[in-house]
Image (spheres, helix red, strand yellow):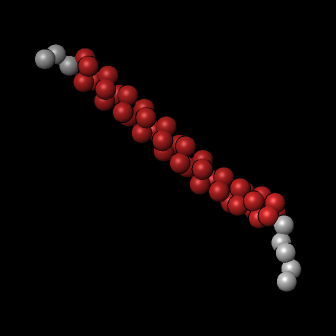
Amino acid sequence: MAQSTPGCYAVTMRLTLDPFRLLLISLAGCLNQYQRDVIDFLTMEPL
């Protein structure tokens, strides 16, 4: 049985997940900004 090095697999997975991670971070930033805008609007609204 041949043993593969786990480091090689980890580098490959890290490189393949980088675009996905960037997409998730961008989406989280947009949702955070939208949530802040809604909170600001609701706090400025007169009762």
Q: Nearer the viewer, residue 32 or 1?
A: 1
Residue furthest front as drawn: 1
Residue 26, position as x, y percentages in the image: 53, 43
Q: Percent x, y for residue 18?
A: 66, 52
Q: Position of residue 47 (x, y in %)?
A: 13, 17
Q: Is residue 6 above or below residue 33?
A: below
Residue at 38% x, 28% y is 36
Q: Quadrant of residue 46?
A: top left
Residue at the left extreme?
47
Numbered label tally: 0
Q: Is residue 29 left or right of residue 11?
A: left
Q: Is residue 11 left or right of residue 20?
A: right
17 to the left or right of 33: right
In-image side of 24 versus 37 (left or right): right
Placement of the N terminus among the 4 image quadrants: bottom right
Residue 24 drawn at (x, y percent): 53, 48
Please give the name of the residue rendered at 63% of the width and 53% of the height, measured from the top-left corner. 19
Image vertical order of residue 16 relative to residue 24, above or below: below
The relative height of residue 47 versus residue 15 in the rendered view (above or below) is above
Residue lying at the far bottom in this picture: please name it: 1
Residue drawn 59% across the image and 54% down it? 20
